[in-house]
Image: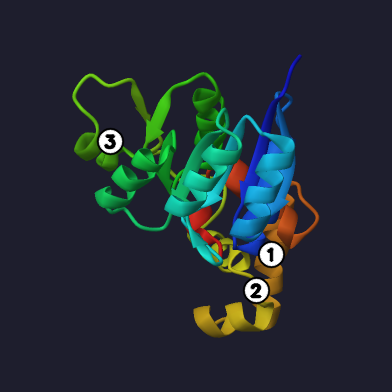
Amino acid sequence: MEKITVLIADGHPVCLQGLSWLLDQEADLDVVGRVSDGKEAIKTARESTPDVAIIDMAMTGMDGIELTKQIKTCSPNTAVLVISGRGYESCAAAVLKAGASGYLLRNVRVDQLVDTVRALHSGIVVLDGVAASKVLPRGADVRSGVSNRGLIAELSWREMDILKLVAKAKSNKEIGKELSLSVRTVESHLANIFTKMEVGSRMEAVFHALKEGWLNLVDLP
């Protein structure tokens, strides 16, 4: 089976590591580049000519609009997906004009992000639902990456609060202070989370929560 090659360019270390790990779990996807700044993204795109490039709208030294232009110049066949923390329709219009094939917010579920990579590779434009209604003509071939699925039922609301803070790289002491809990209580909750999720570490818990849609990219630092 020929794999879809993917370049990930994100200035958030946890996002970069997490997305790389999650996409590598997909049998039909192959992450060929993981970079944290715009210049490295352009260099990697030129050298590896990936099928899809996932880029952060706010990259170091270069915004997503300019980075999209540069990637499309050096690798015209690469479909670019821009991930943004802002929902401004003007951003979506600008990245599309620059040559991007997709624009999603950081609250997209990871499984939908994976589906988006496949859709972009097949030539479909994928936008955040609100942006799509504003910037594309009626009847355009577009899909939305927005989801309304709820959180995992097996975790209590307190465990979900703790998992979200773990995703933000908070220590047990910091979590306890923010939630008015003792460190020992936080440790007990974490042990329960690990047991329920069948994982052995904080990072593994965050990655699996992202994959299952219990957390999304906006929950990361």
Q: Is residue 180 left or right of residue 200?
A: left
Q: Measured from the top left, where is residue 217 in percent x and y?
A: 52, 53
Q: Is residue 89 left or right of residue 172?
A: left
Checking the image for residue 141, the label placed there is: none
Q: Residue at x 54, y 49 (%)?
A: 55
Q: Is residue 118 visible?
A: yes
Q: Is residue 122 left or right of residue 185?
A: left
Q: CA distance from mark 2 to mark 3?
A: 42 Å
Task: Select label 2 or label 3 by which is in front.
Answer: 3
Q: In which quadrant of the rendered view does residue 2 lie?
A: top right
Q: CA distance from mark 2 to mark 1?
A: 6 Å
Label 2 with label 1: CB-CB less than 8 Å? yes
Checking the image for residue 132, the label placed there is: 3
Q: Measured from the top left, where is residue 34 in percent x and y?
A: 71, 50
Q: In which quadrant of the rendered view does residue 103 lie?
A: top left
| Residue type indicated by callout 3 | Ala
Q: Residue at x 37, y 27 (%)?
A: 143
| Residue type indicated by callout 1 | Leu
Q: Residue at x 59, y 47 (%)?
A: 210
Q: Where is mark 1, residue-wise?
A: 190
